[in-house]
Image (spheres, grey):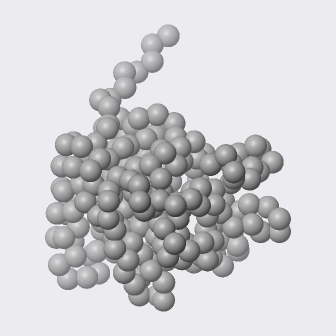
Amino acid sequence: MRHLPVDKRGFPVPWFVPMVNGEPEFRAMDSGKRKKAIKDGRCWVCGGATYEQVTAFVIGPMCGINRTTAEPPCHLECARWSALNCPFLTQREIKRREDEFTESCPMPGHGLKRNPGVALVWITDSFQIFPDGKGDFLLNIGEPSSLEFYSHGRTATWDELMQSIESGFPLLAEMAEKEEGAMTELNEAKITFLTLAKKIGTCEPKRPESTR
């Protein structure tokens, strides 16, 4: 990532971030680079080759449940760096800013416009591309070999993961209820995800309250 440009704060600008009026627009992703990442096997964060190495996705817990994301995979090191350093991923209180620009940049599929509070690095060796029904594409993430959970720049606790799921799951359920049988599949996917999180995840026990 040392070759990446930096913004006025000195923060590295990921490869996928588009430039708008000469400034990086972190709320959007370059659609051309998104296609190039898939076609040429480039890391979504640094732009280097990735598919010959471990494939890692930086997603939220809801994407972990339905195993669907719009963002291509990264090098494992780049994925961990993003989960530990990206302001939006490390600070739950930061909200996604919506305005005319973001409205003009529709997301593939049906993205959840929220801060999940927990970033998940999903490590796998496979994924599949499928149409999103709107002329774009999404990715179905393969079976994980490991799941790493982060919050506030550190390993997330199990309570933080559950809080993220409890706040986000109703949004998935709202969409699933519109399709016959989808709610049953979604509940089963949630159980599968929690089982994997306990078995191969990195969550820590609840952190004790600070005493002063």
Q: Please tell me which residue is depicted at 18% across the width and 56% down the height of the picture.
A: 191
Residue 107 picture location, percent across and down: 53, 74
Residue 63 picture location, percent across and down: 37, 62
Q: Please tell me which residue is depicted at 32% across the width and 56% down the height of the picture.
A: 124
Residue 144 picture location, percent across and down: 27, 55
- Farthest residue toward the top? 212
Nearest to the observer: residue 84 or residue 177: 84
Whether residue 202 is situated above or below residue 18 in the rendered picture? above
Nearest to the observer: residue 60 or residue 137: 137
The answer to whether any part of residue 27 appears in the image is no
Q: Please tell me which residue is depicted at 60% across the width and 76% down the height of the picture.
A: 31
Nearest to the observer: residue 4 or residue 166: 4
Residue 17 picture location, percent across and down: 65, 63
The answer to whether any part of residue 124 appears in the image is yes
Q: Quadrant of residue 93?
A: top right
Whether residue 36 is situated above or below residue 56 in the rendered picture? below
Q: Please tell me which residue is depicted at 26% across the width and 50% down the height of the picture.
A: 145
